[in-house]
Image (cartoon, rainbow, N blue to C red):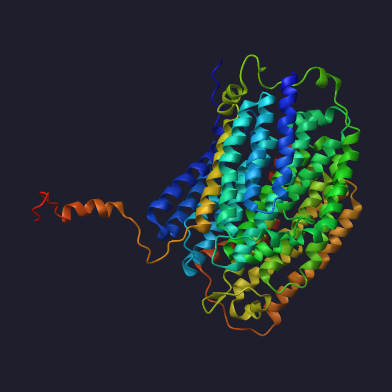
Amino acid sequence: MDIATLPSLTPFLPELILGVGALVLLMVGVFSGARATSLVSTLAVLVIIAAGLALLFKTPDGETFNAAFVLDPFARFFKILALIGSGFAIVMSSSFIKREKFEHFEYPVLILLATLGMMLMISANDLISVYLGLELQSLALYVVAAINRDSEKSTEAGLKYFVLGALSSGMLLYGASLVYGFTDHTQFAGIATALAAGPISTGVVFGIVLFIAGIAFKVSAVPFHMWTPDVYEGAPTPVTAFFAAAPKAAAMAMFVRALVGPFGPAIGEWQQVVTFIAIASMVLGAFAAIGQTNIKRLMAYSSIGHMGFALVGLAAGNEAGVQGVLIYMATYLAMTLGSFAVILSMRRNGKMVETTADLAGMSRTHPVTAFIFAMLLFSLAGIPPLAGFFAKFYVFLAAIDAHLYALSVIGVLSSVVGAYYYLRLVKIMYFDEPVAAFEPMSGELRVVLGLSGAFVILFVLFAGQIGAVAGLAAKTFF
Amino acid sequence: MILQALFFYLFSAITVASALMVIGSRNPVHSVLFLILAFFNAAGLFLLLGAEFLAMLLVVVYVGAVAVLFLFVVMMLDVDFVELRQGFLQYLPVGGLVGLVFLVELLLAFSGWVFAPELVSQPVTPIPPLATMTNTAAIGQVLYTHYIFFFQIAGFVLLVAMIGAIVLTLRHKPNVKRQVIADQVHRSQIVEIHTVEPGKGI
């Protein structure tokens, strides 16, 4: 019997840092009690920064653990997005933690563990690692959604998310088992060869469709979006900010890697499914958001719509399309984090307010914040020359390249409809009579808002470089 | 061979019968007990297949943990199962229809399913044949080497579940007296201890 060689751990270094960091912080929290929340949050941000630095400078590309885990330029791009999303989510929650007496030191630890799950999902190169990464991320998210356990809404959000999430995990597993049964491989490379070798059997198509249904739930694409508005509304606002950013990026990364990588040879089978999901999400996101008065629900529908736009790039299934998805997710992350920085600062008389009417006259009470928020909303609507426009431009260009004309036309039309409710928010801020001013914005929210505003406005200057980086990452598959 | 077949039919008949009793019996405690019987017989079926590891796992995990948990839930929560079942008939037509459609679709999809000839003649054996090694040993050989990554991540998933259970349910109520062992131990230095001879008193 031979002794197994130790797998190479260097491509796994950032995950190792996150995992060990989470365990250490758990101990720190347990031994210093509930008052340690701020300390643990700070340390958690440091752990994320360390993981990010390790990812950028210390980890070579490569496969490890018998090709169950892969680090390539694509994974690196998305991992950086996930780390940024999680890191800022923790930073943005720090004043909320202080003001709302939200003393659960487990919160930053769970975010770290969720981030670990996301990193594993992004790097998953095997059906089993896909599932384990996804489950690690989702379980942490279920708990975080319900973490404000004395609030009925938060509990409902957690329970709803858990039940529907478990169902979608079941579908994903069923799909994965069918794929394994028909291709005889769980590893992505093996599945790709098996599918490329011969006619694609019905069983595999069943498997792929169920797999897509499972992931579509995680990116909250129609028709698996039902949970999104309720969970966004019910969860505490910093948690919602976290949900809207990093997990979406990670799930989208897994979506792209699975479909373009192992299921790439079956593009004829999944292209129409993804096209349908993209169209349905864009249209529902545009129309359902119109009637919303709660800004968190509005952001939920907005995120459904944006996932639809990102999926347009995936439906194209070519290199330009994947590049489009990468750029889209990067800009979406920046816009979402900035918008939630504003939403988190909506406090009046010591309480969070969250209706759109509360924004009235913000241009006079908080001119700078209102200006940046307006820019973010214009960008979300896709108005040039802001970042959101370029993101949409790249995905639609790819769709036209792939001759998906109907998809592109419907996409552009629904983005026009969607512009209505973003512009309505701008109108409320600039032309309605002001109500009382909000409490002053805390320092870290200002920083996040400033950074995301700068990204959105200055994107046009760096569009070429960002496009080049995304293009390099997209080359991984082609 | 005939003995194996006899045991197969014995185990499977009891499994099916007790599974029916699980949903059929009025008393939820009986349901759980029948569930345990079903698990035990399924474990017997695994044993017949030569998968002794799975059989033991089924007994340990499902009977030892899951079924006992069910029993706790049934006995400690006052759930009126008759009331819970009231909607059953109401949803039966729609639910049954959806199930039927899915079943027909699956049948249509898989009716044309043929095994590749080489698969039938030469079954894929990722593990060494039974004659050379028991499958417990075979799993032991790969679990901590080839599959160490999956094993560790599964550990993390369980850790998250544990943290979650504690975060969502543990409450530190005020005015609850808890046993503090350090205080009790410390007390021996404050309180004097006398040895009292019988019948004399201090």
Evaluate whether residue B32 shows in this view: yes
Labels in figure, total:
0
- Nearest the viewer among A321 and B174 is B174
- Nearest the viewer among A110 and A60 is A110
Image coords of residue B163 (percent x, y):
51, 50
| Quadrant of res A414 | bottom right
Q: As drawn, is A365 to the left or to the right of A443?
A: right
Q: Residue at x 63, y 66 (%)?
A: A234
Image coords of residue A409 (percent x, y):
89, 58
Q: Residue at x 70, y 36 (%)?
A: A127
Image coords of residue B31 (percent x, y):
66, 48
Image coords of residue A326 (percent x, y):
71, 48
Vertical placement of residue A234 versus A141, above or below: below
Q: As drawn, is A51 to the left or to the right of A206?
A: left
Please state, as top left, top right, bottom left or bottom right, where the C terminus of chain A lies in the image.
top right
| Quadrant of res A235 | bottom right
Q: As drawn, is A253 to the left or to the right of A31?
A: right
Q: Residue at x 70, y 81 (%)?
A: A431
Please state, as top left, top right, bottom left or bottom right, where the N terminus of chain A lies in the image.
top right
Vertical placement of residue A21 versus A332, above or below: above
Looking at this view, name the residue that lies furthest to the front.
B199
- Nearest the viewer among A197 and A234 is A234
Evaluate whether residue A185 shows in this view: no
